[in-house]
């Protein structure tokens, strides 16, 4: 994908040396933006082999709303480095996607989305299901394009109190959906973006989520847009990314899956077709 390679080239040429909590310095730029059309194929990188199965398992894990990796680690170890010995995480994206904490009582005049609020059976806390809110709102837009929620389809994975203490608060912390005509678009905002390792998975994950929600609600996939606030390349990734820049992108694959309600979709329902990437490139994770 040219958009990704252009970003790599830009950060290599313009990034400033920056130290960080991991002990491995980066080349960093502020506020890089790109977008891709989901009409041109599924945006899974072809200049290196991507572990599609791991990404898909991770997306399903987000959608469960679980706050631990006890089940996820049976299929991928992608989050083990940040979990404790019992598999618990200080921050889990899906926990906020599906079970965002609500106040027991708001100040006078506040309303808190009664339709999507419920009491969490695990914690007894009042929580809000942001993903179900998006699905229901998209269905409402299909019936009434002038609905008041047309420009309010925001999902937040960031809780300030949690982020202040967490070992790794959410990097891709909020995303917003937008409908134009019959196309569903998604914009992701990411506070911290590891261009070699994380961004290719973020792109593939949120593009697929957009395609899933579009199919469920009667829209066509439109565009995926991505703002990277601290876009960085770790110094131990530079030479491998230069190698990747020398590779010619190949045609994008397609992805097939049935039109089932979200809660009925399974890993086995997804088929990646005509994916012909260059060989994989190993990048070390900076924890």
Image (spheres, rainbow, N blue to C red):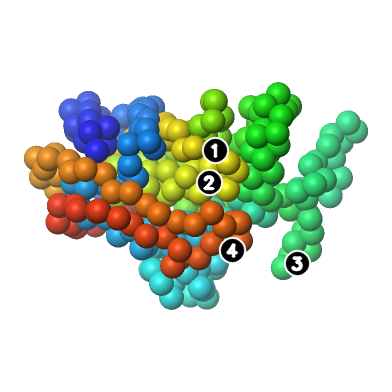
CB of mark 4 within 8 Å of CB of mark 1?
no
Residue pictured at 53% horizontal, 42% vertical: 214
Closest to the camera, between mark 3 and mark 1, is 1
Residue 176 at x, y percent in the picture: 55, 35
**In terms of secondary structure, where does tag 1 sit?**
loop
Per the image, the residue denoted by label 4 is 264
Quadrant of res 248:
top left
Within 10 Å of the Cα at label 3, are there few (<14), some (14-19), or many (20+) other Cα atoms? few
**In terms of secondary structure, where does tag 3 sit?**
loop
Image quadrant in which the C terminus is located: bottom left
Per the image, the residue denoted by label 1 is 219
273 vs 83, left or right, is left
Check the image and name the residue furthest to the right: 108
Of the two numbered discs 4 and 1 on the same chain, state the one appearing first in sequence.
1
Of the two numbered discs 3 and 4 on the same chain, state the one appearing first in sequence.
3
Residue 215 image label: 2
Please count the marks in the image: 4
Of the two numbered discs 2 and 3 on the same chain, state the one appearing first in sequence.
3
The CA distance from mark 1 to mark 2 is 6 Å
Image quadrant in which the N terminus is located: top left
Pick whichever, 236 or 34, lies toward us. 34
Quadrant of res 174:
top right
Per the image, the residue denoted by label 3 is 121
Looking at the image, residue 183 lies above or below residue 248: above
The CA distance from mark 3 to mark 1 is 33 Å
Residue pictured at 45% horizontal, 56% vertical: 257
The CA distance from mark 4 to mark 2 is 14 Å
The CA distance from mark 3 to mark 4 is 21 Å
CB of mark 1 within 8 Å of CB of mark 2?
yes
Residue pictured at 19% horizontal, 32% vertical: 9
239 vs 205, left or right, is left
Residue 58 at x, y percent in the picture: 45, 60
């Amino acid at each position: 994908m040219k958009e990704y390679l252009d970003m790599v080239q830009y950060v290599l040429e313009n990034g400033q040396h920056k130290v960080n909590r991991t002990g491995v310095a980066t080349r960093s730029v502020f506020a890089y933006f790109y977008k891709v059309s989901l009409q041109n194929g599924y945006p899974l990188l072809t200049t290196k082999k991507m572990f599609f199965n791991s990404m898909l398992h991770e997306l399903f894990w987000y959608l469960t709303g679980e706050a631990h990796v006890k089940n996820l680690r049976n299929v991928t170890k992608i989050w083990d480095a940040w979990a404790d010995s019992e598999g618990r995480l200080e921050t889990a994206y899906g926990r906020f996607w599906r079970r965002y904490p609500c106040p027991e009582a708001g100040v006078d005049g506040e309303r808190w989305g009664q339709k999507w609020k419920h009491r969490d059976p695990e914690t007894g806390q009042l929580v809000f299901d942001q993903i179900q809110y998006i699905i229901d709102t998209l269905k409402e837009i299909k019936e009434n394009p002038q609905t008041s929620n047309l420009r309010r389809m925001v999902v937040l994975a960031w809780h300030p109190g949690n982020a202040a203490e967490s070992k790794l608060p959410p990097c891709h912390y909020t995303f917003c959906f937008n409908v134009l005509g019959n196309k569903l678009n998604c914009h992701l905002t990411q506070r911290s973006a590891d261009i070699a390792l994380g961004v290719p998975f973020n792109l593939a994950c949120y593009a697929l989520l957009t395609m899933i929600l579009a199919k469920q609600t009667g829209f066509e996939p439109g565009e995926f847009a991505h703002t990277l606030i601290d876009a960085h390349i770790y110094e131990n990734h530079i030479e491998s990314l230069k190698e990747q820049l020398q590779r010619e992108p190949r045609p994008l694959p397609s992805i097939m899956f049935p039109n089932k309600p979200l809660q009925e979709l399974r890993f086995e329902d997804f088929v990646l077709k005509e994916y012909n990437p260059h060989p994989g490139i190993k990048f070390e994770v900076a924890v």
